[in-house]
Amino acid sequence: MNVSLKVKLTISYVLLSLFLVGSLLVVSNHLLEKKFQCYVIHNQEKKNQNIVHLVSEQFGENGEFPNMDMLENIGNTALSQGLILMVDDWKNNQLFCMSTLDSQVCDNMLDSMRSNMVKVYPHFNGQYVEKDYDVTKNGSKVATVTLGYYGPYFYNDEDIEFIGVLNQVLIGVGALSLIIAALLGFYMANRISKPIKKVIDQTRQIEEGNYTERLDLVSKTKETNQLIQSVNRLANTLQRQQNLQKRMARDYAHEIRTPLAALQSNLEAMIDGVLDVTPERLESCRVEILRLTKMISDIDKIVQIENDSVKLEKTQFDLLEAIHQVVSNFQQELTGQQIRIEVSTNPCEIYADRDKMIQVIINLLSNAIKYTDNGGKIQIIANTFANKTEFIVSDTGVGIEEEDLPNIFEHLYRTDKSRDRSSGGSGIGLSVVKAIIDAHGGHIEVKSQVGKGSQFIVTLPS
């Protein structure tokens, strides 16, 4: 059974409070009980001393025996305090014994004490005990006072009532604490779960394809704020990807429709006899077919590179050697456009997929040649640092408008909206470059000024 976060948090607060309050009550009750027992024992000793003092005053200065009526009065006083009085002379001859005088009352008193203690402590190990005190006059022992009581300590009716009231107060405090904890837990759980519920509603909107709504909510909880920001960023990313997919679909349709329309019109005209079937016209159709094939091949490359299941075949190789290999393949174009090219001479060992990195170099160099005027210059620099490898392809070409810089790595994006396919290509090359660099865990950025040229900076982890 699924339980809501609010219920779980509330139950957690209650259980935690129950544990804390219960522990506090147990500890408090234990400490209070120990203190009260010490108080009772101390008070018992004071009562004993008072009775002994009363008996001692009844003896004369020279040890004359007290009046028996006075001892009986003191015995009754002691009995009211839970004590059984006995007095012996210095020869241990018994002078007075309250239990002998009224054994029934003494037995009833002890039974009452035993009953009270069992009510409070069902397993209390108590028994009748006696304690002796010497009575001295002029430095000589004249008698021994023995006090019998239920020990090691006992509670009278007032003590039992006090303990009952104390336990009721503690139970009341515990119950009140649990109620407050439940209310506080519900309040806190509601505060925590409320923004999360809004996040859930927002994710459902995203799930249904609505990426326009954003969470305008600020929480005082750090993790909740991070969750809100993550959901908003997810919506932004999905909306951007949705727009990109729409534009890509439109651009792909346009890119494919144009050569297909040209092919269709030429073939229909030749079939209908409007145009003669000449090698030149057939060659034009073949060129359009090759252009379509190359475009589809480029799209396949993007799909393959961006597919997470594709694994890079990394090896250790010299990046500089790969650069020289690519440059030699473009030498005819460079010479034809009178473009000077400079390549750094320091070896640069890297661990990467060699074929895909050659594809990166080909695309960047081809791009630089395409937009560099005759007599211009292209420079390629490669360096290895402690934790990264960096290579830069810079040119003195036409440059890129600042508004186009954030989008040049997107599929089919063209910085020159007016150029045709023959001059501008398919607009896929730089997106392939970025996909390869991302697959290697690297980074690519571009710096450019219109009329001064562009600089593409590729960084790869070592």
Image (tube, helix red, strand yellow):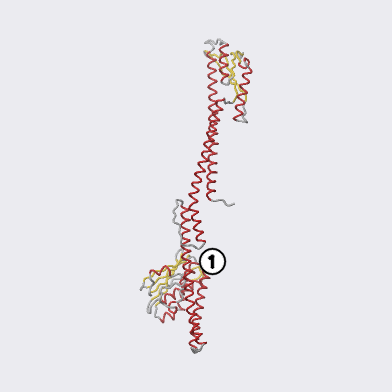
Is 338 placed above or below 394 here? below
Along the line of sight, which residue is nearer the eye, 188 or 340?
A: 188
Could you tell me residue 62's position as x and y percent?
A: 53, 10
Instruction: Say what secondary structure mark 1 lies in.
Output: loop
For label 1, the residue is 308
Is 15 placed above or below 31 here? below
Along the line of sight, which residue is nearer the eye, 422 or 260?
A: 260
Could you tell me residue 255's position as x and y percent?
A: 47, 76
Is 13 placed above or below 340 here? above
Label 1: how many Cα within 10 Å (few below 14, some 14–19, many 20+): few
Q: How many marks?
A: 1
Along the line of sight, which residue is nearer the eye, 204 or 118?
A: 204
Q: What residue is rendered at 51% in x and 85% in y?
A: 268
Q: What residue is rendered at 52% in x and 45% in y?
A: 13
Q: Is residue 321 visible?
A: no
Q: What residue is rendered at 53% in x and 48% in y?
A: 9
Could you tell me residue 407's position as x and y percent?
A: 43, 69
